[in-house]
Image (cartoon, rainbow, N blue to C red):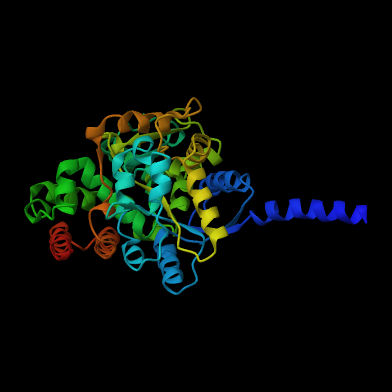
Amino acid sequence: MKTWKIAALMLSVVLPSASLATDLEVTHWWTSGGEAAAVAEFAKAFDATGNKWVDGAIAGSGDTARPIIISRILGGNPMGATQLNPGKDADELIAAGLMQDLTDLATAEDWANILRPASQLESCTVDGKVYCVPVNLHSAQWMWTNRKVYTDLGIEPPKNFDEAVAAAPALQAAGIQPFSLAQGWPVGLMVNDILVAQAGVENFVKVYKDRDLAIAGGPEFTKVFESLAAVRQFVPADKMVPQWNEAVGLVIQGKAGANIMGDWAGGEFAVANMVAGQDYDCLPGLGVTPVLNTGGDVFYFPKSADPAVTEAQLKLASTLVTKEVQVAFNLKKGSLPMRADVDLSAANDCMKKGLAILDGSDAVFPNDVQMIDRDSINQINDLFTEFMANPDMAAADAQAKFVSIIEAAPK
């Protein structure tokens, strides 16, 4: 009898603590080598709380994953948490009352003062309520070069986009792609980066945010489209690869000299054990005008009728912005941490460059998805893809179509 009572007492102690552990499916599209290494840091930290990160990686890009994620939530089959980008992607879900309100947690942990820049949390805020947690600051304005590709040909590694273009014929003659490029959204990213570098941040924001048609159709953008027409001979359509990380891989392998891609490319170089400033260069603003746009990743939490799931969601949201997790994740992701009060002694050359720019607020500007709707962005990307793949499309025709898309975009 005494033994039975002891066993019953032990069981009563074990069961409540075990019931606190909750499996939480987390959807995201981080599937490249560097991304997988980074997301593993989130999973490890959440598992350490006694809960369980159930990985719901969706192969492909965000363009592939977003419709799947949104469809599941609208269809009544929500995940526990999901990656999205700051901007308008979740507006419909929030309006439908399907997303967890994080305002109390954000207030208790003072997110407004510990997370930077303010625009990231503002993108998570609707009618004064916080619905997502920003986990990093990504910027798209980077050019990545393999130093050995150039030095083997007796060329000084380029310090900016113009020098990379000037070196392109020599690389092409040696059977090396001057620029690597992936199909789809990376084309739009490359074109936008060149727009920012050559037309300037102010004009880029006026066009995308303010819908300034005079600038979109004016000489500043004409110069950029003409520059792109000259560059596309170095990125022929038959050399484009399916995924962005494959394009970065060509630079890592020495099969291409340069790639224009966001700072997340840094995670691929890290996985390859390459050292920034020695084996490769990372050039913010394409080396022309060092700037950062305020893109990045955020996590939303669909509402659940299960209190245990809700508790686990709030625990995950809190865990994602702790100092230790911010450092561990972003060092592997290639992005910048949302907090300024973390130990970045292990930061590499690229992260240090990014942090220096972030500290200069005049060099930080919104991401395109924060200024214009997703449908218009897709139309712009399709146009840029067609323009870069079709040498017969005149720069003036591409610019005219671009102006039409901007004019039709909802404000």
Q: Position of residue 290 (x, y in %)?
A: 27, 34
Along the line of sight, which residue is nearer the eye, 24 or 84? 24
Q: How many marks?
A: 0
> Which residue lies most toward the top here?
345
> Which residue lies most toward the bottom here?
75
In this picture, residue 3 sits left or right of residue 210: right
Q: Position of residue 25 (x, y in %)?
A: 56, 60
Q: Quadrant location of the N terminus?
A: bottom right
In this picture, residue 355 sits left or right of residue 127: right
Residue 170 versus residue 299 in the image, above or below? above
Could you tell me if residue 290 is visible in this image? yes
Residue 69 versus residue 37 in the image, above or below? below
> Based on the displayed image, in which of its 4 quarters is residue 338 positioned?
top left
Task: Give the residue at x 27% y 60%.
Answer: 377
In this picture, residue 405 sits left or right of residue 312: left
> Based on the displayed image, in which of its 4 quarters is residue 301 positioned?
bottom left
Task: Give the residue at x 39% y 62%.
Answer: 63
Along the line of sight, which residue is nearer the eye, 278 or 390? 278
> Which residue lies most toward the front here?
1
Q: Position of residue 127 (x, y in %)?
A: 27, 55
> Based on the displayed image, in which of its 4 quarters is residue 408 positioned?
bottom left
Along the line of sight, which residue is nearer the eye, 268 or 26? 26
Q: Quadrant location of the C terminus?
A: bottom left
Q: Position of residue 125 (x, y in %)?
A: 31, 52
Task: Give the residue at x 52% y 60%.
Answer: 80
Could you tell me if residue 157 is visible in this image? no
Residue 117 versus residue 57 in the image, above or below? above
